Amino acid sequence: MKIYNIRMMTIAVAAILLYASGCKPKNVNSAVSEDAAVKTYVAPGKYDEFYNFVSGGFSGQMSVYGLPSGRLLKVVPVFSVDPEKGWGYSEETKPMLNTSRGFIPWDDLHHMDLSQTNGEIDGRWLFANANNTPRIARIDLTTFRTAEILEIPNSAGNHSSPFITENTEYVVAGTRFSVPMDNDNGDVPINTYKQNFKGTLSFISVDKNDGNMQIAFQILCPGVNFDLSHAGKGPSHGWFFFSCYNSEQANTLLEVNASQKDKDFIMAVNWKKAEEYLKAGKGKKVSVKYAHNKYDDKTHSSKSETMTEVTMLDSKDLPGLCYLIPCPKSPHGCDVDPSGEYFVGSGKLAALIPVFSYSKMIKAIENKEFDGTYQDLPVLKYESVLYGEVQKPGLGPLHTEFDGRGNAITTMFVSSEIVKWNIKDLKIIDRQPTYYSPGHLCIPGGDTKKPNGKYVIVYNKITKDRYLPTGPELAQSAQLFDITGDKMKLILDFPTIGEPHYAQAVAADLIRNKSVKIFNIEQNGNPYASKGESTAKVVRTGNRVDVYATAIRSHFVPDNIEGVKLGDEVYFHITNLEQDWDIPHGFAIKGANNGELLIMPGETQTLKWTPDKVGIYPMYCTDFCSALHQEMSGYVRVSPAGSNVPISFSTGKNEPADSVKTTASVK
Amino acid sequence: MKIYNIRMMTIAVAAILLYASGCKPKNVNSAVSEDAAVKTYVAPGKYDEFYNFVSGGFSGQMSVYGLPSGRLLKVVPVFSVDPEKGWGYSEETKPMLNTSRGFIPWDDLHHMDLSQTNGEIDGRWLFANANNTPRIARIDLTTFRTAEILEIPNSAGNHSSPFITENTEYVVAGTRFSVPMDNDNGDVPINTYKQNFKGTLSFISVDKNDGNMQIAFQILCPGVNFDLSHAGKGPSHGWFFFSCYNSEQANTLLEVNASQKDKDFIMAVNWKKAEEYLKAGKGKKVSVKYAHNKYDDKTHSSKSETMTEVTMLDSKDLPGLCYLIPCPKSPHGCDVDPSGEYFVGSGKLAALIPVFSYSKMIKAIENKEFDGTYQDLPVLKYESVLYGEVQKPGLGPLHTEFDGRGNAITTMFVSSEIVKWNIKDLKIIDRQPTYYSPGHLCIPGGDTKKPNGKYVIVYNKITKDRYLPTGPELAQSAQLFDITGDKMKLILDFPTIGEPHYAQAVAADLIRNKSVKIFNIEQNGNPYASKGESTAKVVRTGNRVDVYATAIRSHFVPDNIEGVKLGDEVYFHITNLEQDWDIPHGFAIKGANNGELLIMPGETQTLKWTPDKVGIYPMYCTDFCSALHQEMSGYVRVSPAGSNVPISFSTGKNEPADSVKTTASVK
């Protein structure tokens, strides 16, 4: 009886405690799920802990996610037009997408790498590659905008890019498709690949102060396919490692013909040696045209400059510059551990993961432990450089990141899993399924000297049944694992924009306080800015009409314009006079064969319009800005060519509708 | 001692139970947060409960989110180009963005409405408006693709659109900006607004079988600004209600000049009466050009047709067609409750919310309770139609949805809150802050006869400090509230694409099982399809080169093409031979002044390329499709104009590189 009472009381008190804690009894599965729910939940108004910068792949853009919530915070336009933001449509941004072949509206952005100082993320810039029309972009992490795009000549399929050295001395860009060099005769049969097709590795220097990029040198290489790369660090600082496949030099049906050999290569490049050769005048100046585009936050506009020359170092003529290390089999990922001693080649058709030793490589070079040459380049003996092999890791190893606790995690594309292994003993510690076919993975700082091993994010290529179906086309998917324990725990699936390839993540604190909120209107250097409503005006110069307009809640000045004629080119220069965070204005005019403008506080942006029909054209603010946003509109009257309607415009004063300002035509 | 033991045991057992439940003791705040975490968490591999279709606003696209997770499942291109998906870049999709003014690359998509049968969501189609260049789109919810776009002539700022009747008899489209009619002389001074500017309301019929849209009729209206609308339902089926502001007919500085009057109007339109007038021949045929674009899933391509006529009903000449109901003050949202008896006007400058009664309106019309006319249209007495006013609801009421339990929820833009009130007694039940400045809101089915009152999602205009900063431009934000209890509980913030305006949500089960996974290759009716590798070929016709190519893991046939010359126009017709879900292939060629192609299983898509330089151009699959995806590539050789290199191409057999197939030129 007493025991019964005690039991009853115990249950009652436990029930009360459970109730008070807001927690219902549950089974183990739901407890696991609840634990994951709580771990990934970022309550309304709270900030995520990490920024996750994810490549958009075939979208050409870069996405910014918050972790652990997996929320998409922003899509930053980089290589593809974005009519929403006016990217590639406004006069100020059009030059950013210029190339030696003219304006290109799309590209394929595969990899990103954050700038580093002393081998750690410094939070200044993010670099990204354009794969199709070879280019490297620099994104400014104070504005989250693309600040610079540099075209890479003598390249095609700019894939082993844009990986960086530990002080951002260089960003590299390696060609995936070998091709005849830009100034060679390109009209050659494709089956003359072996004679006529070459690869290049470009080393792009980055100015420490302003980030300005320039091609320091290119290294001419045999015609193979360079796939991925990472820089050495610590002891191996001064070296760069590139995976390459198709050492068969096949040029058709690569699926079969480039998978013949048991081993392809990792190419180790001694870039300090390259610097010595350059100093010694061993570089050859090569005339070639490529574009260099820069956006200036002071003028809020960009310029495209045509470059005319690169300096080429020919790998086969310069001893000590490039060494080939055999690597099974069609290597893809090429990753360097935080210590800089180990580098990992992931052969996508290999049944093991080779781990190479930097110090063994140096000794092998010193001791000339060579296994002949390939295309005139020295091939080091596999065993002489090999630290060891991870046995039976799974099928289709692609990429490896590091947790900072002595472990590596590798994605297995074919067997759809991630595998955690110890860098020293090469023993497998854990494996977890992924859904499905993982490509890249990312640990915050996972390719630097100081990884933050709290999470790994895995970017999968196949989604299939993981989300509600959306027709034949499905989002690709990221999966977030907690890796703080021995076992990796899947805690969240989140869909992604485009096709995520490589990604970077960083503790939010490093970046968030540097974020620009507004542009200072006083410092607006755009030559078409109107810094106050009294300076708004409309000026005709021949058949060009410049509208210098202002936007502030909730009106444009001018909001009515007459005297535009068929045959005119009209430039709307809209200055957003707001100086509050998160008060953009938008601008669009009916029927314009163009995008819109989104103008941030303090900024000026320009939309070009060539009216094609007489009539009245409403224009309006496209970004809901105030309770009277719907009233933020105006009209443009377009008269026939030769009409004598003079330029006139409203002045923003609450005047009778017919007392508008009239300006004489200016020729 | 015994008591002590009992207490100890109780605590021990409680602790064990708590531990076993995976739940740590916590304070009330964290319990609330944990409760919200669990409510919004959708575990990896689990499906969301609702689809949330959200307008992209100035992005021009439509986003699909899962609820309650807030995960972005897909962005569907509608009115803006999308080089990622080839939307507006492939030959098959270019016609979809054609208008009477030619190709337009961008628009501003504000509102969406799901098709209904008997006043309930039927899950077939989703309609969306283009605000800037007036158009209505129909999205097919089996493919999640834009199936049809119809241009709306005689309109500007197509804003009170595309709301639908309870059996999808009509989709309406009302002009926000009044303008001279398209075929009037548009070269008129803007200050002749009152004489020359008109508004129109377009009623677009929807074919019950295939969804085909056509403009059944337009109603010519006074020159005011039509803002939003909703159809009657149940007893009020046959009527449509439109809010309109700027009854002042101002044409400059609307912020001030269109906010003068104490009341503007809701216009009640009797569309059954309109049908009678049409039958009686009261419609006037008006010649005007507009585009009608349709995508065909059998041919995987679209056509743009030019329409030449609309039938116009002049509201001022046709008694009983349109009535004006005074509504304070600059009304914006116009929402009809599930019963169809009540309609709500949200005056954005009003300090109350008027609720109108449909049955009182009918009586007032019968009893001729008029308050004069406005622009020749009868104005009903406010009090005669008013059911009652919600007093002190907050500041800046914008939009109202219904929970199906007799309550309405209204967003308050200025006071940044949502307010729940009872439709019958008009008493306020609850108010909750939102962050910040809410625009539209959405309850699944919240504008139909059968709302699902589990959640309300609020779409805010200002985000400011709610997420990690991303420079001057921030994502706009949605907030998810649990509304199953009396108090509305905020459980999740999630950022959104573009600027969300109206949204729709529906239980996933209604749609997900109808989702198309692949296109049947046997039924592919694209005239340029290659249904097998043996039919792949390259054909020259004058300076046009058609490449009939196939894609299947992991190769294109052909993968090498020679004989293309400068001055040629090359059309790559790529057929994806896969018949598995989620195995798209992509296609791009270096330096093309174009987007890419993403080709779904069984589909054919075409990229046009005009090479501008002699050389070797790599082409490749842009969507990581297999372990040998990197090998899925090829080359095109471009020779000088006049070169005698014949057309030749690889056949996909593992042949020596020089035994390619050569075709004679066809003139």
Image (cartoon, coloured by chain):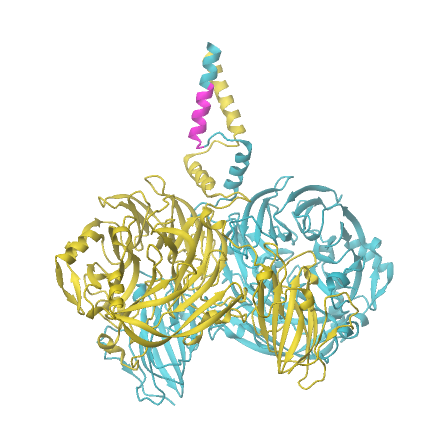
Chain colours: A yellow, B cyan
- Asked if the stretch drawn in magenta spans residue B14, the answer is yes
Q: Is residue A606 left or right of residue B593?
A: right
Place residue A224 in its image quadrant. Answer: bottom left
Q: Is residue B186 left or right of residue A320?
A: right
Q: Main secondary structure of the magenta part?
A: helix
Q: Is residue A469 left or right of residue B275?
A: left
Place residue A646 in its image quadrant. Answer: bottom right
A418 lies above or below B516: above
Residue A460 in picture, x, y percent from top left: 38, 55
Instruction: Give the magenta range.
Output: B10-22
Residue A126 in picture, x, y percent from top left: 42, 58
Q: Is residue B425 left or right of residue B538?
A: right
Residue B636 in picture, x, y percent from top left: 33, 77
Extreme residue toward the front, this view: A280
Viewer-side residue, B10 vs A358: A358
Place residue B564 in its image quadrant. Answer: bottom left
Q: Quadrant of the C terminus of chain B?
A: bottom left
- Asked if the stretch drawn in magenta spans residue A468, the answer is no
The residue located at (43%, 34%) in the rendering is A27
